[in-house]
Image: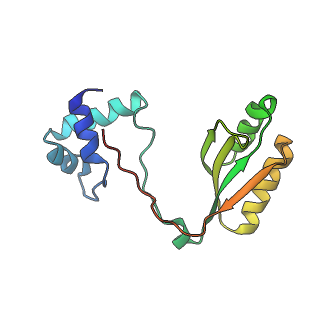
Amino acid sequence: MTSKDKAVIKKLQPEFPLASRPFAVLADQAGISEKEMITFFKRCKKDKVLRYMAPMFDMRKLGIVSSLIAMRVPEKKITKTVKVINAYPNISHNYLRADDYNVWFTVSAASERRMNTILKEIRNKSGVEDMLNLKTRKVFKSRAVFDL
């Protein structure tokens, strides 16, 4: 990643423009051509620097419930448990951590009932019962901008 690439990424982080030609707007902000910007995005996607691009909705305003889940998964069950968790489209993040509670993920659902069903299924399919359901009480920040 070149210093020019990092400068472009820094300009892109705050917001994706809602415009008929968003890459032209971004290119103008970054001081490059629209073609260069599109090529840059394609390269970032190919190199897996850019994982995905999608709008970020306030799920609470859409009636969606979510929670951070921590599981204490024995080493021998990690692979199976991760496969079980990742099979659900409701899971947005899933991380292995160096802690007693070593598998952390976020789950969202249309209702508390559906979320509880998903969590019960995960426990049953993985064979791991030790799970903390850390429900969101208040969101303080949900946007990250990285200093490159």
Q: Nearer the viewer, residue 140 or 26?
A: 140
> At x 35% / y 32%, what residue is drawn?
44
Q: Is residue 53 above or below residue 96?
A: below
Q: Is residue 81 left or right of residue 24?
A: right
Residue 103 horizontal/vertical position (percent): 69, 41
> At x 13% / y 41%, what residue is drawn?
31
* Colour pattern: rainbow
Q: Where is the N terminus found, in terms of image quarters?
A: top left
Residue 43 horizontal/vertical position (percent): 33, 29
Q: Is residue 15 left or right of residue 28?
A: right
Q: Nearer the viewer, residue 137 or 60?
A: 137
Q: Is residue 67 above or below residue 123?
A: below
> At x 60% / y 69%, what residue is drawn?
137
Quadrant of the image occupied by residue 111: bottom right
> At x 68% / y 39%, what residue is drawn?
99
Q: Is residue 49 above or below residue 87?
A: above
Residue 145 horizontal/vertical position (percent): 35, 49
Q: Nearer the viewer, residue 141 or 34?
A: 141
Viewer can see residue 90: no
Counting labels gives: 0
Viewer can see residue 147: yes
Q: Is residue 109 left or right of residue 15?
A: right
Q: Where is the C terminus found, in terms of image quarters?
A: top left
